[in-house]
């Protein structure tokens, strides 16, 4: 295994967020447009509200994006694999900038 592949493997092996992919929790949120209850798996970033049809984003966990040194890499990876769209990636990068700028 090359050094780069090994370092990426080790990064994700130690990532506390990986547990959400193995044993996902359900997170309940309310649609900000119609107040419908929406159930997210913790790895889902957005869903279409079943009542009003609008896109509802689940807010990112501060315990991940605000402190993890690999947050930017994770966003880039999610975007490149099509798991989040460009608008969501931009929103998450803005969140990182605001959080790190406020320290």
Image: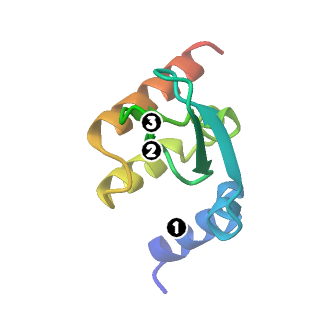
Q: Secondary structure at mark 1?
A: helix
**Residue at disc 2, secondary structure:** strand
- The residue wearing badge 3 is 51
* Farthest-out residue, bottom: 1
Q: Residue at x 71, y 56 (%)?
A: 25
Q: How many marks?
A: 3
Q: How many other residues sit within 10 Å of disc 1, few (<14), some (14-19) or many (≥20)?
A: few
Q: Is residue 102 above or below residue 91?
A: above
Q: Residues within 10 Å of mark 3 (few under 14, many from 20)?
A: few
Q: Between disc 3 and disc 1, whose residue precedes?
A: 1
Rendered view: 52 above or below 73? above
Residue 8: which numbered mark, if any?
1
Q: Is residue 69 left or right of residue 51?
A: right
Instruction: Please identify, in this view, whether the residue under mark 3 or under mark 2 is nearer the observer.
Output: 3
Q: Secondary structure at mark 3?
A: loop
Residue 49 position within the rendered picture, expressed as x and y whole percent measured from the top left: 44, 38
Question: In the shown orientation, is residue 10 left or right of residue 1?
Answer: right
Q: Whole-Å distance between the Cαs marked 3 and 2?
A: 12 Å
The residue lying toward the viewer, choosing from 26 and 20, is 26
Q: Which disc, if any, is residue 47? A: 2
The residue at the point 40 percent across, 29 percent down is: 91
Between label 3 and label 1, give the one nearer the viewer: 3
Instruction: Give me the residue at 39% from left, 56% from top.
Output: 77
């Amino acid at each position: 295994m090359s050094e780069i592949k090994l370092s990426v493997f080790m990064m994700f092996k130690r990532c506390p967020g990986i547990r959400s992919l193995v044993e996902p929790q359900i997170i309940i949120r309310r649609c900000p447009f119609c107040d419908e209850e929406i159930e997210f798996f913790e790895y889902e970033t957005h869903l279409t509200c079943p009542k009003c049809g609008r896109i509802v984003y689940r807010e990112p966990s501060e315990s991940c994006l605000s402190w993890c040194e690999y947050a930017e890499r994770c966003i880039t990876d999610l975007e490149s694999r099509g798991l989040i769209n460009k608008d969501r990636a931009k929103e998450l990068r803005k969140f990182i900038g605001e959080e790190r700028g406020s320290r």
